[in-house]
């Protein structure tokens, strides 16, 4: 494993210090303001249909798997169209398109019919909007759509495409580049686009050819304060690990995941949870260690679980997740024991789910499956389904929340849901 360190400029640090803090109602990352699915709002809409409580909906150029983000009165969305990678800005008031910027696709990008190009969601700090377009590079724009910088990271190649999204923290943009033969974590100065450090993770493969080496991480890192220091917690194939966000130095590693990792890490009260994908493993590990902590800090490991693509949430000592086959689970954080599981199905044509959970401040969980059926259930060790609502269109991305409204991205439309 190899880490490169490049000195961060004082100019970049100064700009980072001036970056605006999240405003009320902002949804700056696809997993919300804290990057883990927790929503600070409550009393959100619980009933809607294709016609009821729809404040507006606008057509999109084509299908896509990314999730919208929101800052003040602007919504940002990535989209593939006609050999171009698009970042589109909409008004949250009425869905009007305010601007779009395009980046040419590079070469012949490899993807999958279930995962269109531009599946990574954008992210913003209120000054920059950053989008990753795989082989077409990492790009930053102002909120008005003016280009700030672009960084060519060379080819990303995997039979199932890409999906990790940039993460912004204290003036630095972090990205899990991969999956494929080249998989690495990179830290970039948000003001200039200059590389600060890079951690190369060995053992990647594109999944092409007769060998069918299926390995890769689509996970987003999560940064948390652990005692007197920060840790960038991440899920790579076969392990959960942590890095110093400033230098890229690996702090600790814990074995116990399988070779395919789609979900992002979860964190609560000093415990990190990682979950694998197809027939995957799951584990919990105490953070704050050094070196290989598999034997000293790993609390539990589940060796086989249902396919997980969407990420879950942690709440009051419990793990909640909606799995790929559409079965919601609640597990005990301390032991990993399964407390309940319930199949969630609605009027849509499929119960398959790739979306990640959103937890509101009043303890409700929101998710939407590929059939366009949204479920609201209580974050409780006793299962209670409160509502099922359908929009009748295919949805892969997750729900975004801002100022009492829900934003949904289907393969056909961008939706805004409001009212009680």
Image (cartoon, rainbow, N blue to C red):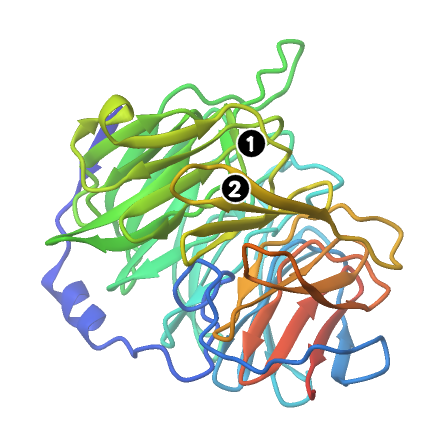
Query: What kind of element bears circle 2?
Result: helix
**Placement of the N terminus among the 4 image quadrants:** top left
Name above or below for residue 282 compared with residue 232: above
Direction top: furthest residue:
210
Query: What kind of element bears circle 1?
Result: loop
Please provide percent x and percent y for residue 205: 52, 21
Can I make out residue 182 in this image?
no
Please provide percent x and percent y for residue 400: 58, 69
Direction front: furthest residue:
382
Residue hosting label 1: 157
Of the image marks 1 and 2, the number of the one nearer the N terminus: 2
Nearest the eye: 256 or 35: 256
Residue hosting label 2: 135
Can I make out residue 66 in this image?
yes
* Residue appearing at x 58%, y 54% in the figure: 356
* Residue appearing at x 73%, y 64% in the figure: 374
* Residue appearing at x 47%, y 48% in the figure: 137
């Amino acid at each position: 494993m190899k880490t490169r360190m490049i000195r961060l400029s004082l100019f970049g640090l100064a700009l980072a210090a001036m970056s605006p803090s999240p405003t009320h109602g902002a949804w700056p990352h696809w997993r919300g303001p804290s990057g883990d699915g927790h929503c600070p709002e409550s009393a959100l809409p619980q009933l809607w249909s294709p016609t009821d409580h729809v404040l507006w909906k606008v057509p999109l150029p084509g299908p896509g798997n990314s999730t919208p983000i929101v800052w003040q009165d602007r919504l940002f969305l990535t989209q593939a169209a006609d050999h171009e990678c698009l970042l589109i800005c909409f008004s949250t008031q009425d869905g009007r398109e305010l601007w779009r910027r395009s980046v040419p696709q590079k070469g012949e990008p490899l993807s999958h019919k279930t995962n269109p190009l531009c599946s990574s969601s954008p992210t913003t700090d209120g000054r920059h909007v950053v989008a990753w377009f795989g082989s077409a590079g990492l790009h930053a724009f102002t909120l008005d759509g003016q280009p700030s910088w672009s960084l060519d990271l060379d080819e990303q190649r995997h039979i199932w495409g890409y999906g990790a999204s940039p993460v912004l923290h204290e003036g630095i943009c972090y990205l899990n580049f991969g999956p494929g033969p080249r998989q690495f974590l990179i830290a970039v100065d948000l003001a200039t686009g200059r590389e600060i450090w890079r951690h190369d993770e060995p053992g990647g493969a594109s999944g092409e050819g007769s060998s069918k080496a299926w390995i890769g991480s689509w996970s987003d890192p999560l940064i948390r304060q652990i005692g007197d220091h920060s840790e960038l917690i991440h899920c790579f194939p076969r392990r959960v690990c942590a890095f110093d966000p400033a230098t890229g130095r690996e702090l600790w590693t814990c074995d116990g995941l399988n070779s395919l990792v789609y979900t992002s890490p979860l964190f609560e009260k000093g415990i990190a949870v990682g979950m694998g994908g197809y027939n995957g493993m799951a584990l919990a590990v105490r953070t704050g260690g050094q070196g290989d902590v598999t034997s000293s800090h790993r609390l539990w490991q589940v060796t086989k679980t249902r396919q997980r693509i969407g990420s879950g949430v942690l709440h009051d000592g419990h793990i909640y997740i909606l799995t790929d086959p559409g079965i919601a689970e609640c597990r005990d954080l301390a032991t990993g024991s399964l407390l309940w599981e319930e199949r969630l199905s609605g009027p849509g044509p499929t119960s398959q789910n790739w979306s990640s959970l959103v937890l509101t401040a009043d303890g409700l969980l929101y998710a939407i499956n590929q059939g366009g059926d949204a479920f609201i259930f209580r974050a409780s060790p006793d299962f209670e389904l409160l509502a099922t609502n359908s929009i009748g269109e295919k949805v892969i991305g997750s729900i975004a929340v801002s100022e009492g409204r829900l934003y949904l991205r289907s393969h056909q439309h961008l939706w805004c849901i409001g009212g009680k």
